[in-house]
Amino acid sequence: MSDSGEPLIIGVDGGGTGCRVAIGTRSSGVLARAEGGRGNVASDPAQAIKNICNTVDAAMAKADIPNERLAEATAHLGLAGVMTQDDAAAVAVAMPFKDVAVTDDRPTALNGALGGEEGFLLSIGTGTITAAKTDGTFRSVGGWGFHVADQASGAWLGHSGLRHTLLCHDGLESHTDLTRALLAEFGDDPNTITAFSLSAKPGDYAKFAPTIIATAAQGDPWGEVIMKSGAHHLEKCLTRLGFQPGEAVCLTGGVGPHYANYLHPETLSGRVQCAGSALDGAFRLALERNAQRLEMSI
């Protein structure tokens, strides 16, 4: 596979579980995609930058395009953990692209899910994104990272599950199938949970989210408590963003759609299907950036 020689357009989506890259051109669209290691800038900046660069290289190889062409590229990187302009600048300067925008992953997730249209987004994966675009204005709440926020996320689910497991082990609460299953993951040794917690990243906690989601769906009391708590937080976020029942709202991410059974029915009365991924949003924003640059040069 090869491109036409046009300047390259590159979109990057990075989160706590992995990063994804799309490479293409204005006329041909996406030519190749690749996936790589974690891309959360807050958790491990140096490793995130390394993983992104390696994944870009992998996408270039798939497209059969020499890496020298990256010097002509326009890129948009939407990365979890980008909290300040300094964070964005540190990533941008490490990239080989001619023109690059670095943001957190909220604008790219919103753009991708709603296909550039207006509405509200609950994008729940390893982290949590609650965002809206109304009257042409982008707004969001939360997004302060796993250690102090990211309620309802996959990482938060896993962390909550382990907290409940330790409470049950201590006899402060009653065990359920969920807490027994989580304890069994650590050889029925609570000390192993503590050791795990000392170095665990958000993605490590998120590995337990499927167990919590599945047991909650089967009626496990602690699973339901955790999922309902996450849903309550999401409802509050939508209210803060000015959401009204009937407005377009999209549930995305590996965890997001699983909250459908825990949100109020009126909240989902205007639910829309996901138009695309955060990677699609990043690629679209890179295209828009390239078009703006072209207009300015005329």
Image (cartoon, helix red, strand yellow):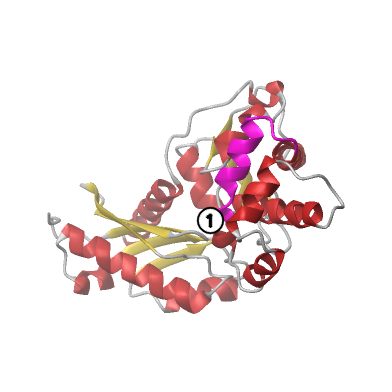
Judged from the image, the secondary structure of the residue bearing numbered disc 1 is loop
In this view, the residue in front, 243 or 212, is 212
> Which residue is more in the foreground, 236 or 209?
209
In the image, is 138 to the left or to the right of 61?
A: right
Quick check: is 278 in the magenta stretch?
no
Query: Residue 137, percent across and down?
Result: 62, 45
Which quadrant is home to the N terminus? bottom left
Q: Pinpoint residue 208: horizontal percent, then vertical percent.
A: 58, 51
Query: What's under tag 1, amino acid-wise?
Result: Asp
Vertical position of residue 14 compared to residue 260: above or below: below
Please name the residue shown 27% across and 68% down the image: 57
- Residue 295 lies left or right of residue 211; in this view the side is left
Residue sitting at 72 percent across and 52 percent down?
160
Question: Residue 65 location in percent, x, y?
Answer: 16, 64
Does the segment drawn in magenta span residue 214? yes
Residue at which label 1 appears: 105
Instruction: Read off the magenta span.
Output: 206-221
Dot 1: within a 10 Å radius of its alpha carbon, few (fewer than 14), some, or many (20 or more) residues?
A: many
Viewer-proximal residue among 293 and 182 = 182
